[in-house]
Amino acid sequence: MFGFGNCGSHGLFGKFAGMHGGMHAGMHGPFGSHGCSSPLSGIDLTDEQLEKLAELKGQAFSKFGHGKVDIVDLYKRLFKELAKPSIDEKQVWNITDEIRGKKSELTDVLVEHLIAFAKILTPEQRTKIKINKIRKLFGIADAFGFDH
């Protein structure tokens, strides 16, 4: 067990969380924390899987970071246009279309990374994630890493 269900070093059990969790206790996952409410709680990941997930996480953050910056810039342009004495509605709608397009691109990137993430896991691990998500939805303790 790699200890993803122990809330990590910043979680419920503080710096002592990793003492029984193995060498990967408290690590953060491909798209976020492996704390108490993580869907990866109790998932035994191999070192190879961890390396692949870390690489995927870096790629995702890079793509999302650039995309989000682009969207912020587009919103700035939009509000600048709306603040002008004379509003060019055609320009406002053009910028709005650009925002929609950029958001659509980010959705595609997200889906691509979710597919790649799922392919790294075994079918059993994907099933465990599904169960963890359901348990979390219903507030069952096992989903929060208290299953050991």
Image (cartoon, grey):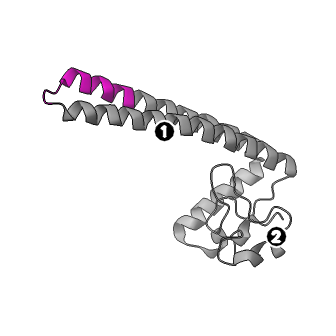
Q: Secondary structure at mark 1?
A: helix
Q: Which residue is mark 1?
A: 68
Q: Position of residue 67 (x, y in %)?
A: 51, 34
Q: Earlier in the sequence, mark 1 or mark 2?
A: 2
Q: Residues within 10 Å of mark 2 (few under 14, many from 20)?
A: some
> In this picture, is 120 found above or below 105?
below
**Residue 46 shown in magenta:** no
Q: In which quadrant is the N terminus drawn?
A: bottom right
Q: What type is the residue that disc 1 sits on?
A: Lys
- How far apart are labels 1 and 2 at the CA level? 35 Å
Q: Residue furthest left?
A: 86
Question: Does 114 sit left or right of 90 as displayed?
Answer: right
Q: Does the magenta stretch mainly form a helix, a strand or a loop?
A: helix
Give the residues drawn in magenta, as a range.
Answer: 85-99
Residue 93 horizontal/vertical position (percent): 26, 25
The answer to whether any part of residue 80 appears in the image is yes
Q: Nearer the viewer, mark 1 or mark 2?
A: 1
The residue under the point 41% across, 38% down is 72
The dot on residue 21 is 2
- Residue at coordinates 76% horizontally, 53% vertically from top-left? 124
Image point (69%, 58%), residue name: 40
Q: Amino acid at mark 2?
A: Gly
Query: For this rendering, which residue is in front, 11 or 129?
Result: 11
88 in magenta? yes
Of residues 75 and 123, the one nearer the viewer is 75
Q: Is residue 103 visible?
A: no
Count up the numbered dots.
Answer: 2
